[in-house]
Structure formats: C-alpha cells, structure tokens
C-alpha cells in the first residue's frame, strides 16, 4: 500500500491522458485511493513521523476550496504548530528564465549531501483564461525529487498575487512539523511586485541574470530593497565576465538602500547551477545571516511579526469570503453590475453602495 501511495503522489502532476498507458486495474486503485478519507489523527501522526505521502495529502486538504475541509485543515495546522523546530525558511525569486528551478535543485542536493532535509514549495502560475497550471517543477527537478531527504510540492498560484500560493504559509508549517530543516519557497517570478514571499521567510534570495538589462534594476526599489542577498546566476562560460561586471554594479546599487533592521549587509554573489559553482558559498552566507539574526534577537522577532501579518491577512480573506457567500451580497452585486454596464453609476459609487447596505444589514 505504501508503494502505491507513492505512485499516486508521483502521478499527481501528470495529465489524466497519461493514465491510458497504465493498466486499468491500477488506475481504478489509484482513483479509489484519491477518494479515500484519511482519519485526521492518522494524517497528523503521519506528518509528525515525516511521512511524505501524508504531508502531501495534508497540503492538498489545505488547498481545497471545499468548505467541509476547512475545519480539518485548521486542525492539522494547529497540531503541527505545536511541534518545535529549528528550520530556516528561504524565499527564492527572480524573473522567469533566471534558472530558479535549476538553482534550487543544485542547492537542494548540496544541502541533502550535508545531511539536511529539504522541502521545496514551488508556486506555478495559474492561467487567467483556463484557470489551469502546469505544475512542472517536480519534473524539472528530477534528481532532487528522487532524493529521500527531499520533498517537492508544486502548487498553483490561483488568484493569489505576489508570486506565492494561497496556502503557502500553512504548507511551510506542515513541512517543518514533518522534520524538514530547510524550506525553500520558489516563487512564480513576476518581477518587481513579487514581495509577498518576503513576509513568510527568514531569508530572501533574489536571483539575477547578467547581460539581460538586469543591471538597470539595481537603481529601482521594491524587490531589490527587500533582498537579503543577490545571486548572479548562470555565471559560466562566455557569460562569466558579464556576471563579474553585474556583481560590481549590484553591489554599488545596494549601497543606495538603508541598512537592514537586523544589521545585516546584503551581499552579491555569483553562481552557476550548470557547473555547480558558488552554491556552497551561498549556503554559508545564509547560515551566517541566520546566526547573526539569532544572536541579535531579530530571527525570533521576525517570526512573530510574520505571524501577526498572517493573522491580519487571514482576517481580510475571511471577510471577503463571508460577504461573497451572502445571498444578499450576490443579488445586490448583480443589480449594481447591470447599472455599471449601462453607465448609470460609477464602479466606485457602486462599491460604496454595496458595502453600506451590507454594513447596515449586520447592525
């Protein structure tokens, strides 16, 4: 049964059409297992014991939009929060094509080689037209996905902004409870606005390319200002000299920003996922950052601030869902939408009218 569960987990990212090549009786068993309701205590015990299948199923429960799954998912998170951990959360971002997946695979293999357990939460962009996601990160990280000390979970971004999925924070908690020492959060790669991940990790690494106009981004604020370090990826071959020049330019640019609250001075390093160079130096730098943050108390302070932000953002989400589920909201909304279409009222006035009506209804 355990092997079949693993088979189900590995199949989760494949299109349904691929089932044609699988024996019919095996497909039937797989579908039956997917529908099986796992007892809550069994799922929690499995996570705490480091069972990757149970961890994967729990994250699926978290991401479910079924209202019946909400209470169960919360119970799992509550139990997992109580387990102490010594993990470090690392956010990795960069523009599409910078080589995030390749970098993460090499970094992950380096860490498991050092005896670390690594969890990768990869966020894949969701189409605004089809509402679908490829979820191909696990396929791209073939070597790491076979590592017994690694766990890779691709998730769709859905309607979430900022490069992360709706339940990334909760997924981090579950991975930590399962005994993973390093949590790598790979973001979608949406550019300067990709800053939400910064509010849920301990270390924020920005991957950059040389020779692609990226040096000009050094004078812009936003994501650059939040980065704890910049890694110039693909610093190999003919691109090595350009990477050295970019390293100098970005180092100068970082001096334009005010110092970090924890006293850390952001650094710029070069690396190559293809040649596996500079990866260990990046990990040494992250450890240096963590040690400094722990010693001056900023590490714990940052985690507490993140939990407060998590609470406030969850309140916003719950209020939004609460109003959208009300019948009176839907009927008034549809009526106002017709008035907006016919230019009878402005969208701003319509929104104020709807909220005023709902507020009075709650009194």
Image: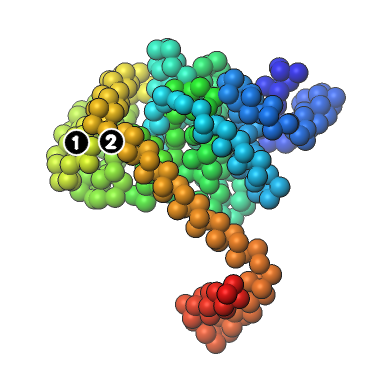
- Observer able to see residue 15: yes
Q: Are marks 1 and 2 in contact (CB under 8 Å)?
A: yes
Residue found at the very far front of the displayed protein: 363
Picture coordinates of residue 27, whole percent (x, y): 80, 28
Residue at image x 53%, y 36%?
171
Residue at (60%, 28%) from the top-left corner? 55
Q: Secondary structure at mark 2?
A: helix
Q: Is residue 296 above or below residue 325?
A: above
Name the residue at 53% across, 46% down.
166
Determine the CA span between mark 1 and mark 2: 9 Å
Identified at 71% across, 18% down, the residue is 2
Closer to the camera, 190 or 153?
153
- Mark 1 surroundings: few (<14), some (14-19) or many (≥20) residues within 10 A: few
Q: Is residue 28 left or right of residue 285?
A: right
- Pick the quarter of the image with the C terminus: bottom right
In the rendered image, residue 360, in percent from the top left (x then y), is placed at 57, 78
- What residue is disc 2 on? 298
Left or right: where does residue 322 sit relative to residue 202? right
Horizontal placement of 172 versus 203: left or right?
A: right
**Residue 219: x percent and y percent?**
20, 48
- Please determine whether, in this image, residue 308 is positioned above or below residue 150: below
The number of numbered badges drawn on the structure is 2
Identify the residue under disc 1. 263
Please say if 334 is above or below 223.
below
Between 161 and 173, the one nearer to me in the picture: 173
Q: Earlier in the sequence, mark 1 or mark 2?
A: 1
């Amino acid at each position: 049964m355990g092997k079949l569960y693993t088979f189900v987990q590995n199949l989760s990212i494949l299109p349904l059409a691929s089932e044609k090549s699988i024996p019919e009786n095996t497909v039937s068993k797989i579908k039956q297992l997917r529908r099986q309701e796992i007892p809550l205590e069994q799922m929690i015990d499995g996570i705490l014991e480091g069972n990757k299948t149970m961890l994967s199923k729990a994250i699926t429960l978290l991401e479910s939009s079924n209202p019946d799954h909400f209470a169960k998912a919360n119970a799992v998170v509550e139990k997992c929060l109580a387990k102490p951990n010594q993990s470090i959360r690392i956010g990795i971002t960069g523009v599409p094509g910078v080589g995030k997946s390749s970098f993460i695979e090499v970094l992950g293999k380096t860490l498991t080689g050092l005896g670390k357990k690594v969890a990768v939460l990869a966020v894949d962009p969701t189409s605004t037209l089809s509402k679908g996601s490829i979820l191909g990160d696990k396929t791209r990280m073939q070597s790491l996905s076979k590592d017994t000390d690694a766990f890779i979970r691709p998730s769709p971004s859905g309607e979430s902004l900022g490069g992360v999925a709706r339940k990334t924070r909760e997924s981090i908690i579950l991975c930590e409870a399962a005994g993973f020492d390093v949590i790598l959060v790979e973001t979608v790669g949406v550019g300067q606005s990709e800053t939400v991940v910064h509010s849920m990790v301990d270390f924020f690494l920005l991957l950059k390319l040389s020779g692609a106009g990226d040096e000009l981004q050094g004078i812009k604020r936003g994501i650059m200002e939040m980065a704890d370090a910049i890694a110039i990826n693909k610093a190999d071959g003919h691109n090595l000299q350009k990477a050295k020049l970019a390293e100098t330019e970005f180092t100068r640019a970082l001096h334009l920003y005010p110092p970090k609250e924890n006293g850390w001075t952001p650094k710029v390093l070069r690396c190559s996922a293809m040649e596996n160079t500079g990866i260990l130096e990046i990990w040494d730098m992250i450890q240096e950052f963590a040690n400094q943050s722990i010693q001056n108390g900023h590490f714990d302070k940052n985690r507490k601030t993140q939990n407060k932000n998590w609470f406030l953002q969850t309140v916003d989400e719950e209020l939004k869902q609460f109003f959208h589920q009300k019948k009176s909201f839907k009927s008034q909304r549809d009526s106002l939408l017709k008035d907006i279409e016919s230019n009878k009222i402005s969208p701003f006035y319509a929104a104020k009218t709807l909220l005023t009506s709902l507020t009075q209804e709650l009194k």
